[in-house]
Structure formats: C-alpha cells, structure tokens
Amino acid sequence: MKRIYSVLVENRAGVLSKVAGLFWRRCFNIESLAVGETEDPNVSNMIIVSSGDGHILEQIEKQLNKKIDVIKVKTFDESESVSRELMLVKVRYSRSNRKDLIEICQLMRATVIDLSDSMMTIQFCDTPERVALFLKMLKNVRIVEITRTGTLALTKCMETPVPTE
C-alpha cells in the first residue's frame, strides 16, 4: 500500500537530514521526496511517498509527528490526491525515428524544449502513472539523460454544498 505524507516543517538547515535519518534508522523506504518553501518563508512542505503495510505506514506518521521541527503531518492515499511529476528527458534521435518521437510527444502532451541535430530534450508533467507510460513509449529511443522531480501532491478539492434560501 502506498501513502503520501504532506509534512510541514520549519524551513532551516538540517531538517531534511533529520527526516531522512528517521526513515533510514527505521528501515522505511522513501519512494519519492520533494521539498519546497510554502507561502511562509519560514515553513517548507515535504511531500514524501512511501509504501508498506498498514502498521509501517502508521509508524511513519507517528515518528514524523514526534520530530521537533515538524509542524504538521497530513496523510492521504493516491485516490484522495491530485499528483504530478515533472520529468526532463534527453534523447538521441535519427531521421528514421524523429517523426515517431514527435508523434509520441504530441500524443502524450509532452513538450520539446531543446533541440539539436541529433538530440532533443523533452519536458513531461503528468501523473506518476503517465510518466511511467511515457517512459515505456520511449523504449525504442536512446535515452541519454533523465531527471525527475518525484511526486508532488495535494488533497483533492472537496465541494461544500451551497446553502439555498
């Protein structure tokens, strides 16, 4: 089972190391980690994706809440969230596969952001599942370099009923 943790932490040196150390000491796996400053420059938001059985996921939440630098921990499942991942991938292409590569990009709504005679850099932002699908579609192309952000997620917006008069 996969769980997403949105962890508000104090924005200061060493906090990331302390949180990562907690996972390391307890042998919890981090599948994805993204950290960014919030609207308050003194607070950062860590989005951590981890997996395990129910007991492990519960322990992760409890241990995160014990950390002094942690302000608040929210947990949610993938079904309760809107998630995206950004990927930049540099590929080598030839005349014979260039058209196919452009068609894949158009089909998946990826953007070519840099181009030379034999290489192109593609930007792709979508759900983690579609990022994996995009990579599968590139299996016949030589990938030179790749970088990914990891999962960013927020809980889905919930509509509140509007009172009628």
Image: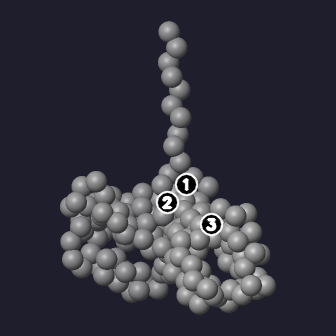
Quadrant of the image containing the N terminus: bottom right
The part of the image, by quadrant, that contains residue 95 is bottom right
Amino acid found under the numbered disc labelled 2: Ala
Q: Give the crowd class for mark 2: few <14, some 14-19, many >=20 residues within 10 Å.
A: many
| Mark 1: few/some/many CA within 10 Å (<14, 14-19, 20+) | some
Say whether marks 2 and 3 touch (CB < 8 Å): no
Residue 162, position as x, y percentages in the image: 51, 22
Which numbered tag is attached to residue 81? Answer: 1
- In space, the residues marked 1 and 3 are separated at their CA atoms by 22 Å
Circle 1: residue type: Ser
Residue drawn at x 21%, y 61% is 42
For discs 2 and 3, the disc positioned in front in the rendered view:
3
Identify the disc placed on residue 11: none
Q: In the rendered image, which quarter is residue 53 located in? A: bottom right
Using the image as rendered, state which of residue 67 and residue 123 is in the foreground.
Answer: 123
Q: How many marks?
A: 3
Work out whether mark 1 precedes mark 3 in sequence or the reverse, and give the earlier one.
1
For label 2, the residue is: 153
Residue at the image point whose x is 34% and y is 66% from the top: 36
- In terms of depth relative to the viewer, which is nearer, 165 or 112? 112
Q: Would you name the residue on which mark 3 appears?
A: 110
Mark closest to the chain's N terminus, 2 or 3: 3
Foreground: disc 1 or disc 3: 3
- Distance, label 2 to label 3, CA atoms, is 20 Å
**Labels 1 and 2 touching (C-beta < 8 A):** yes
Q: Under tag 1, what secondary structure?
A: strand
Q: Could you tell me how far apart the alpha carbons at marks 1 and 2 are, in whole angstroms?
A: 6 Å
What amino acid type should be assigned to the residue bearing mark 3? Ala
SS category of the residue bearing label 3: loop
